[in-house]
Image (cartoon, rainbow, N blue to C red):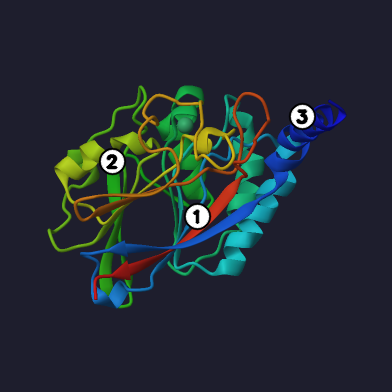
Amino acid sequence: MKLLFGGAAGSFANGFWIEPSRLSVTRREISCPRLPAALDGLRVGVMADIHFKPDQDEALLEEAVATLNREKPDLIALPGDFMDEDPAVIAPMLDLLKKLAPAHGVFASMGNHDGWAFGGAGMRQRFEKAGISFLINRNHGIRVRNENLVIAATDHIWLGKPDPAATLRGITAKTPVIALVHEPDYFDELTEWRNIQLQLSGHTHGGQCRVPFVDYTPAKVAYGRKYIQGAFQRGDSRLFVTRGVGTVGLRVRFACPPEVAVLTLRAAV
Ligand SMILES: [Fe+2]
């Protein structure tokens, strides 16, 4: 009985006071069959769902930024949910995010909370002033290793106005596309429009609390019911869903630590 009580108390303490601040780094290879050979080995940093609370999360975000900088990815994607409901957190958050320094740019997109709390125009203006490309239903071409690469992003899906035609407008058939879409379940719809190389999503927080060893979470959210965390594929397209950095609702995580990810893209050989 003592053992049981001790275990439950320990799990409770871990979930509320330890795990939400215990950043993990996921490094994994993603095979992208139609990636040009010149882009084999491209490294993409991913950080989502910051849900910044300056009084609680400053050290965690500082660590996440420093970790991604140490990893030296070629570019960094920030697919949405930067706040809960208070746009005042944007300024102190951007003071930290503008320290991200990959060679080929930082790209951000809307999350549902950003849309509900602040709206796209304000987000875009603030982020671009901090040197971060903020994409809403549009795309941005870059040159990496003498190859064209396009970063595209939709609006958030949940009550936003995602427009895949506008998002993918002007991209030639052979140009590789990395798409930021906050809500992962839109993967099926986007791949109907175009067989994109890689979609990067967050939104689910991996469930925030998971049942250890059985890879299950009871917490499901709209547009995040099918793809909860990790890597998936559909045709030649790939999806990566990150557990994210922050928390929403109770500041609790269990068997589901905060995550920044560094993905190494592999072309077919
Ligand atoms: Fe979200």
The amino acid beneath tag 1 is Gly
Instruction: Compare residues 235 and 93 and report the one nearer the observer.
Output: 235
Q: What separation in Å lies between label 2 and label 3 (alpha carbons)?
A: 38 Å
Front: mark 2 or 3: 3
- Residue 15 image position (x, y, % from top left): 71, 34
Q: In which quadrant of the rendered view does residue 165 lie?
A: top left
- Residue 93 image position (x, y, % from top left): 63, 43
Q: In the rendered image of this protein, does residue 231 appear above or below residue 33?
A: above
Q: Circle 1 is placed at which residue position? A: 131
**Quick check: marks 1 and 3 in contact, CB under 8 Å?**
no
Label 3: few (<14), some (14–19) or many (≥20) C-alpha neighbours in 10 Å: few
For residue 252, side relative to residue 18 (left or right): left
**Quick check: marks 2 and 3 in contact, CB under 8 Å?**
no
Q: In the rendered structure, find residue 8 and report the number of the disc placed on it.
A: 3
The amino acid beneath tag 3 is Ala
Q: In which quadrant of the rendered view does residue 30 lie?
A: bottom left
Q: Secondary structure at mark 2?
A: helix
Q: What separation in Å lies between label 2 and label 1 (alpha carbons)?
A: 28 Å
Q: In the rendered structure, find residue 139 and report the number of the disc placed on it.
A: none
Name which residue lies at 37% across and 25% down.
Answer: 158
Q: Circle 2 is placed at which residue position? A: 187
Q: What separation in Å lies between label 1 and label 3 (alpha carbons)?
A: 46 Å
Residue found at the far left of this picture: 173
Instruction: Compare residues 258 and 103 and report the one nearer the observer.
Output: 258
Of mark 1 and mark 3, the one earlier in the sequence is 3
Front: mark 2 or 1: 2
The amino acid beneath tag 2 is Phe
Front: mark 1 or 3: 3
